[in-house]
Structures are given as structure tokens and as C-alpha cells.
Image (cartoon, helix red, strand yellow):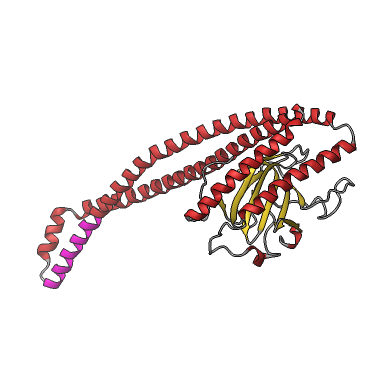
Amino acid sequence: MLGTLLLTGTAVADGEATKQQLRELNQKIGSLKKAITSQQGERSSAAKALQSIEKDIGRTAAKLHRITQKSEQQQRKLTELEVRQRQLREQQQNQKALIAEHVRSAYALGKESQIKMLLNQENPERLSRTLTYFDYFNRARSDELSKYRDTLNDLEKIKPAISAEADALAISRRELEQQQQTLLVQKQQRAKVLANIDGEISNKTISLSSLDKQRKDLESILQAVEREVTNIAMPANYKPFKDLRGKMPWPINGKQMNRYGASRQGSAVTWQGIQLSGNEGDAVKAIHNGRVVFADWLRGAGLLIIVDHGGDYLSLYAHNQSLLRSEGDWVRGGEGIATVGNSGGQRQAGLYFEIRYKGRPTDPRSWCQ
């Protein structure tokens, strides 16, 4: 998922030095990915199939997320147009009633009556007031007719806009249904791959060995990121990560499924983060402003995204269903960067979350409230 660096959220203009650092970082991470892939060459066909299908699911789920957002925006716009149309129609009826009243008044008054009234006025002041009244009456009637014409024009313009928005919404809904069907098929394929993997992992020793290898892969990525990103400048308006200790939100609202630092499956491998339960497809939000420095699939972590917050702090989000941001993107705290999933061979949907300082894990519970 390496590619052109995009600016999102904060619309920060990168200096040339920062752009060069990011280009070098992307190249080094790309080389590291190739090295890890080469080291994993002995992996079974089932493990390779898992990577392929989970990346496919990630792309489909990301597309589904974008279409859903687009569809919701179109629905909001359509609703606004329909509300405006109803308002214009009410306005039209009110204006018609007012114009009709003007016409009735003009008919009752009559031109001949108007002349008689003017000729019967012997008092100059009263005559002046009468002339002013007639002038006001005619101008008011003219203004109401002009407003009525404008309302009719607005109504004519809004009809094709409503029609176009309704057509666009219908197309988005068809695309949504197609992507949902594609995702369903891909999930069925994934279930078959996982069944094959379960057959290969026949005992606890093999399972723990695989867990240890997965952890080492993740550590190698984190070490490379830590080496390369420490000098990338953060915008001056970013509040330092360390100043928000104990005040940041969790990336998802979910139950904590493990204890930080505890043993995993009774082995020497310990929990260096927190596993949070979640609903598939829910938004995973960045806990603070920063730069995405890794966004790809990794054995054991599945679809993984890592955000650099400056000051030697990183946050890590694993087992996602899809990644909504790419390497090099700026993100703001609270912004969606992924969706909850079970990639990396997990059986239940959830999010694995870590916070690192100078390459070492730190308990997320001391940072998030």
C-alpha cells in the first residue's frame, strides 16, 4: 500500500526535507516487507492464501466503507432538497394567496373609484397621503408578483436536482449491494482457509512457535519504523503526545479482553498491548494527531496501521478489516483510520492496540480513559 503521499485532515504543507525523509522511510519499509516475505517463504499454502484473501477483504471492505459514506451524503443532500422543495411550495401557496388578495382589493377599488377619490380630495395633505397609498399599493403588488416568479423559477430548478440526486443514490445502493455480496463470498473463502490452517496447527507447541514468529515479525517492523521516523518533524500546532497522558480516548469502545504484560497462552510471550472487543466494520479512530508510517498486512497482526505521534511515540492498531489511510497520510485525533475486523487469522472481531515510546511498549491504560 505504499504510494503517493497524501495530505489529509490537517492539510499540512510538508517541507522538502520532510518529504525526502518520508520517501526514504517508504523505501526502507518496502525493502523490509520484501525481506519479511522472503523469510516467510517456507509458509504453507494455507498461510499464503490467508494473506491474499484478507488483503482482498480489506480492499472490498474499504470500498464498501467509502460507498456507504457516499450514499449517506447523497441521502442527506436528497433530504435537504426535498425539504427545500416543500418550503418553496408552501411559500408559493402563501404568495398566491397574497397576490389574490391584492387583485381583489384592486378590483374593489377600481380605476374609476381611484380617480373619484383623488378628485374629491380638497385637502392637499390628504391628497398627498392618498397618492402615496396608491403608489405603495402598486409597488407592493409588483414586488409580490416578482417574488412569486422567483419562487416558481426556484421550484423548476430544484426538480432536476432532486431527480439527479435520486438517480445517484440508486447507483450507490446498487454498488453497495454488489460489494456486500463480494465481501460475503470472500469471507466464505477465508473460513475455508482458516479451517486448513487449524488442521496444520495440530498441537500447542506449534501454535506457540507460530505466535513467537509473528511477534518477531511485528517487532522488526516496529524497530525499523522507530529508527527511521524519530526525526520526522511534526507540525507546531500539534499538542505533544506526552501532555495528554490519561486523557486520550480509546480507539474503539470495547471491552478489554486481556491484561497488559500477562502471559499469552502460558508462554514466555507476553501481552504488550490491549485486545479490545468490537463489532465488525465499526470505525477505528486515531487516538491523537500524527502521521501514518505503516499500513499493510503482516503475519499475526493482519491488516495493521501504525501512527507516529512525534516525540518518539507510536500507536499501533492490528487485526483490522480494512485500512482507510495510507502510509504518509496525516491524521487527526478521532479520525477514522481503519475498520474493526478479524484479520491475521482471528476468529472474533476486535482490535489489538499498542502504544510505544522509544520502541518499548507502554500500558495503554495509563494513556487512554
Residue nearest the observer in this picture, 187 or 263: 263
Residue nearest the observer in this picture, 172 or 338: 338
Q: Quadrant of the N terminus?
A: top right
Residue 308 left/right relative to 169: right
Assign the magenta stretch its main secondary structure: helix
State how many labels appear: 0
Is 153 located above or below residue 256 in the figure? Answer: above
Residue drawn at x 55%, y 34% is: 173
Is 132 located above or below residue 226 in the figure? Answer: below
Residue 282 appears in the picture as rendered: no
Place of residue 144 in the rendered image (x, y in percent of width and height, measured from the top left) = 28, 53
Residue 221 left/right relative to 290: right
Confirm whether the magenta stretch covers residue 131.
yes
The image quarter containing residue 304 is: top right
Place of residue 333 in the rendered image (x, y in percent of width and height, measured from the top left) = 60, 57
Residue 26 appears in the picture as rendered: yes
Is 47 located above or below residue 295 in the figure? Answer: above
The image quarter containing residue 296 is: top right
Magenta part of the chain: 124-141
